[in-house]
Image: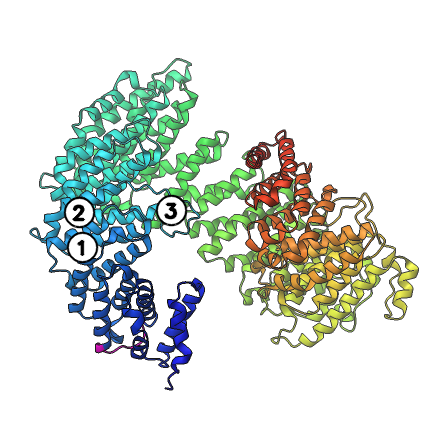
Amino acid sequence: MVMVPPGEWVPHVEAYVDVSRPAVQHSASVDALAALVNKDKLTLFDLVSKMDLYLTTTDHIVRSRGILLLGETLSRISFKYLDVITITTLSDFFISRLSDWQAIRGALVGCLALLHRKHGVGCIVIADVKRLVESFLQNVPVQSLAAADRKLCFEILSCILDRYPEAVKQMDGEQLYGICEAIDEEKDPECLMLSFHVVEVVMKLFPDPSGLAAQFAGDVFEILSKYFPVYFTHGVGNGLDTTREDLSRALMHAFCSTQYFEPFVIPLLLDKLSSSLPLAKIDSLKYLDKCIRFYGADRMVRHASAVWYKLKEVIFNLSSDQLLISEALNCLKTAIMYTDSSDKDLFINLILLDEDIVNKIHSVSSVEKTILSSLEDLAQLHALGSVISILAESSTYFCTRVLQEHFAHLVDIVGTKADYESWQLNNCNGSSSAPVNYGALYLSVQLLSSCREVALVSYEDFSSVKLAKGSWWLILQKKLEQLIHLLRSIFAIASQSMQPNFRQEYVSCAVKGLLTLATFPEQCSPLPANAYEDILLMFTSIIINKFENLDLWRLSLKALASIGSSIAKFHASEREVVYYRTVVDKIVSLAESYDTSMPLGLRLEASYEVGTAGLNYMLRVAKSLEVAVVTNISESEANGRMECADHVAHLFECYSNRVLPWLLASGGVNELALSFALHLLDETEDLTVLDRISSQGLLDSLMTGMKLLVGVCTEEQQSLIVQKAHSTISSMLSLPMELMTDRLLPVDELVPLHSVSETALISMFSSIIIGLRPQTPVPDMMVMIKLFTVFLLNGKMPAAYALASIFNKYLHNPEFSHENQMDKILDDILERCFSTVLANSCSKTSQSCAGTSDVNFSDVSSRNKLSKINILSSLAWIGKGLLMRGDEKVKDISMFLLKILFSDEILSTVPSHQEEPYGGDSSDTSLAISAASAFHVMMSDSEMCLNKKFHARIKPLYKQRFFSIMMPIFLSKIKETTVVTTKLALYRAFGHIISNAPVPAVITEAHQILLVMVDSLAKLSMDVGDKDLVYSLLLVFSGMLMDEKGKECILDNIQITISVLTELVSYPHMMVVRETALQCLVAFSTFPHSKIYPVRRKVVQAAVRALDDKKRAVRRVAVRCRHTWQSFT
């Protein structure tokens, strides 16, 4: 390898040593030198030789720069092999430089670079590491250094402890004291992260009871304790990666690094639980949970009493928030599980025999507390129930002890069977009845839930629990019949003589109790089979007969779904049979029935929720919805009921939006979808049926359902569907299909002869085409395209969706023989559409077409002008399909739409009694406005077709490319035109393109489009029909405000921008426009003061006007805006 002459690299050394040079040049010099060494064009020996003067000079500035250059170079050649002599020489040099406080940074960088080197490329030896540690602790005053140098110090210590622990295992007390001294009083977050890690590793290195960790635990913890709890005051934008959570986690690990911290940590954490700061309490509980797990039972048993009393204070404190109580309960659970001493009754006796707990349970069972009287009572009861249930579910032994103490007594307090029969009789007679003791009921159910948790842990080997004398299972069985009767009776009693505010609590508790009993694993369930079925029947009866009480109805539905899920989880085959017969069949049949008093929405909700319990149940739900749809279509044929349309629409909505997505996520949907699709085709094989479907408004629902079903099928299944549909069309259309194979037929040869039913047939077929995969062949593809074209030219939009899908998926597809023909027919279709739209009158149409085609357009030109707008929309959809696949023919469509936009006159108008297909409902909507809306169709994402769900071909970055092509053209045309109506149409098209383009792409061209975008906001805000577009443009503008490049562009045009935004603050047609405009004005407050001060008065006046806005959200932002801008005074 040829060496680089010194003349080429020495200037880099000189540039780095020169402190007057910029930091960028310093960095470039190091990179250049390291690159030469890595490429063997410069040896490290030559570099050090030439730098000798810089490394040893008495000028401390030059010397420090030289040593730092060598250290930085060494850190950049970490993968370059260095021999032992070189490593030893460098080690000696940098270790010796640790005593040179004026050049300390370079020495630290060099030492760290040596420590980071891997074994295979030459690394520092252990003897040198030991010398490095000694020199470091002796010579480096860590806390006297700057933060960046302190960070290097801690990185060195951390690296030594992690990678070379054997070098410090012989550390003496003085050296450990040196490490503590380096850490003490550290405040920098990044340095603290490293220092906490250093403590953690050091203490783990000496686990011996006579080691340094045991001897110095108190001294080390005294340093650590100053940082608990971690308070972090650094702002978000300070450039630090370290968060408060990171620091707190690192300190927690340090606390748990050695068991010798236990005498100091636990008292500190318990003391902090009495702090008035919520943060200190939360952290104390988190640390306590972690420390209990780490220190173990032998050490924690001495703190058991103190831990319980402190946790009790938090749990039963009414001022504690829910997060704090939740953390305390988690900590209590950990304490119970991990404080397992030789006396296993220690912790359970602490709780069960605690005077406060005893008094609370006694209070619950007293006559005075039979019914809830306040939210405070409810909170205390929930806290008591949580403590008791956590204790009971900790182990089989604890569960048995708790149930022995309280369960039978609590159940008896709730009531006996005779009590409830008497209460129900009194209620029926109108007499007052004794209230239900909610406290006893709640605690009974909590204990029941704890029993289930214990059973879940040991259900695989449960025989020993059943056989054990006095076990919780036997206690539960003795009271089971009484408990079930009490829980079921609650539903009748809860509606009588009870405060409405707390009625829901009683019902929820009863439902939870029955649900818990029904979800025990089958092999350890105390429920006999008949009782299990009775619970299912009761919940099912509520679903069918008590839907007026929605709270109870939804609780019961959720309970049934949970029971079904538990069956699937534990593979309970016997229970599954019962559940299927008792629940699934009865509830799912509700969706199939038309004549029932229950609202359809509730029936569908019930069917779906029960279906979510398992795949087999959901398949049953899907099949029932299929039967319901087909049945209702047949009934609509028989009796002509118009309400069937709405019914079928709801069925399809449930199937499409809920059932189908769930099945797709769970698998097993393909065969079901195929069956459903074929059934729908069977129902639509008759033109009279199609006519009735169209007249009753069922067509849209059937089309939506069909394309979703086809979309989830496999290619083979889709082939079956499309072949059947093709056969149906061939047999039902009055025009022989063979006549369409030679040329595109004139519109008047087919469409006028066909009824609404035949149009519906084509619409159904188009929905099948939309859902096809690109690999699925279509029979007689060219014939189908020509057929769709004829319907498209008559303004039928489903045909446009089908053609857009065909050209997106099948154009230039080598798998099909007709790929070459599709180019030509696409050209013919586009030419036909262009000619039809441009035909202003019969005479002009005839003249324009006479020279180019033998087609007679006389009837077309006399049709309603709505068909032309639909053709423009169709062109947009075809263009969208071509654009998404990246086909160049989209340019032809774009240029034609631009031609329509740039016309000086309104070409056609929709009659006032007609409804515009998209873009607004205005009766004077023009072709130019429709052409502008066409760009929205092309650029926006669609749920109707051409998306991933329907297997469209989507080329990456297609929106960016279209934006880049069209923007220069639009900017030029907008600049040229002087006709107001034309400019407005161009603004609309321009707005649709940039509002649907990716924001980063728009920001890249911000310098060109900002003024046009601001002007379009001003002009379009005058028309209520453009309110959605105004909001979309405003969102793009707000994106620019968040980007540095966008800010620069806005800053150059701040006056006009502020003027438009202040006008939008009073925009009357959409609240979010006013709110967003105000938010943008607030964002302007971060701009340079000299730029925004001149417009301060205008912004404040706009904000003051907005203070009287009708919407609270706008007023809130207006207050913030006014306050922000008034502060500039």
Separation of residues labelled 3 and 1 (CA atoms): 50 Å
Seen from the viewer's position, the closer of residues 595 and 862 is 862
**Tag count in the figure?**
3
Left or right: 929, with 666 as reference point = right
Picture disc at residue 202:
1
Left or right: 687, with 708 as reference point = right
Mark 2 residue element = helix
Q: Which of marks 3 and 1 is nearer the N terminus?
A: 1
Q: Nearer the viewer, mark 3 or mark 2?
A: 2
Separation of residues labelled 3 and 2 (CA atoms): 52 Å
Q: Do the residues labelled 2 and 1 touch (CB within 8 Å)?
A: yes
Q: Which residue is drawn at 18% across and 70% down?
A: 125
On the image, the x and y values in percent for residue 1123 come to 55, 34
User: Is disc 1 surrounded by few (<14), some (14 to 19) or many (20+) residues within 10 Å?
Assistant: many
Q: Looking at the figure, which quarter contains the C terminus?
A: top right
Residue 79 included in the magenta stretch of the image: yes
Q: Which amino acid does label 3 sit on?
A: Ser
Picture disc at residue 565:
3
Q: Residue at x 57, y 43 (%)?
A: 1089
Q: Is residue 2 visible?
A: yes
Q: Which amino acid does label 2 sit on?
A: Val
Residue 989 included in the magenta stretch of the image: no
Q: Most extreme residue toward the top, as rendered?
A: 431
The residue wearing badge 2 is 220
Q: Residue at x 76, y 66 (%)?
A: 830
Highlighted magenta segment, given as a residue range: 78-85
User: In which quadrant of the rendered view does residue 786 lie?
Assistant: bottom right
